Amino acid sequence: MEDAETGVKRALNLGHDDVNVPGGVGENVGGEVAGENNGGVKLVDGPSVGMVFSSWDEVNHYYRSYGKQQGFGVVCVGGRKPLKTEEAKTVRNYVWKCKCYGLEQYRRVVNGKRVFVNVDPLVKKKSKKCNCLVVLYATMHELGEWVVIKVVNEHQEYTSKPSHSNHIVMFKNEKITKTVEARIDNDYGASSSIPQIYNNLAH
């Protein structure tokens, strides 16, 4: 049986994005501030080649903040380790992509072998992937600094708007505070149904 928080997150279509963090606590400074919008909220500069960050955490925080500001989800798809065995434990290259990046892949078995195809005529599956090209590629230099070496900011087949962030899982999760979790636990302990818990949170 799932616990209260898991059940309600499922009902609200909320969930955590998986990401492999290479370790360490960054300064979490983020990008440079470009100005303020009408609501007084600080705006984040768009990424560009040559930007330097002191840690992986800082790059991750910056690009996710930028994605939230622009209205698109961000996925960290992993990194690549160097070939030298003495440095094999250090990941030096990482890629961040728009959640709509690329095309949906389907697994099929052909002649006893598992293959991946972009179009499966046997399966009708909804997907957010629309071959968007937005990506940020960063690499770690010898001094430990992370430098952006490739970036694409223009979306393809997808128009991002700041209001879209209200419907993206990774940003909706930020609104689940300790107070909200406590209310969920109390309602769940009182044997309230998931729809009832959802309605209580909405008021």
Image: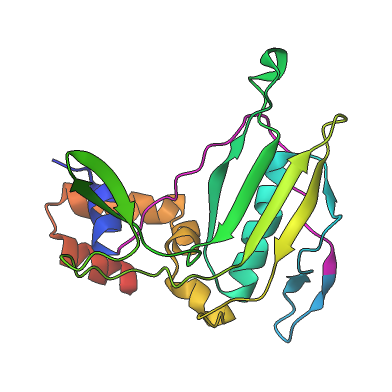
Task: Work out which residue is located at the far bottom of the displayed protein and give it.
Answer: 38
Please indicate whether residue 15 sits to the left or right of residue 146 in the image: left
* 26 drawn magenta: yes
> Considering the image in quadrants, where does the N terminus appear?
top left
Task: Work out which residue is located at the far top of the displayed protein and give it.
Answer: 86
Which residue is depicted at the point 29% across and 64% down?
A: 12
Please indicate whether residue 82 sits to the left or right of residue 199 in the image: right
Above or below, 171 relative to 158:
above
Front one among 91 and 106: 106
Q: Name the image colouring.
A: rainbow
* 73 drawn magenta: no
Q: Visible in this render: residue 185?
A: no
- Where residue 169 sits: x, y (%)? 42, 62
Above or below, 81 relative to 5:
above
Q: Main secondary structure of the magenta part?
A: loop
Please indicate whether residue 83 sits to the left or right of residue 108 in the image: right
Above or below, 114 relative to 190:
above
Magenta residues span 13-33
Which residue is depicted at the point 18% across and 65% down?
A: 123
Q: Visible in this render: residue 51?
A: yes
> Considering the image in quadrants, where does the C terminus appear?
bottom left
Front one among 84 and 73: 84
- Where residue 11 sits: x, y (%)? 23, 62
- Where residue 63 sits: x, y (%)? 67, 58
Please indicate whether residue 179 sits to the left or right of residue 48 in the image: left
Above or below, 175 relative to 114:
below
Which residue is depicted at the point 39% across and 70% down?
A: 128
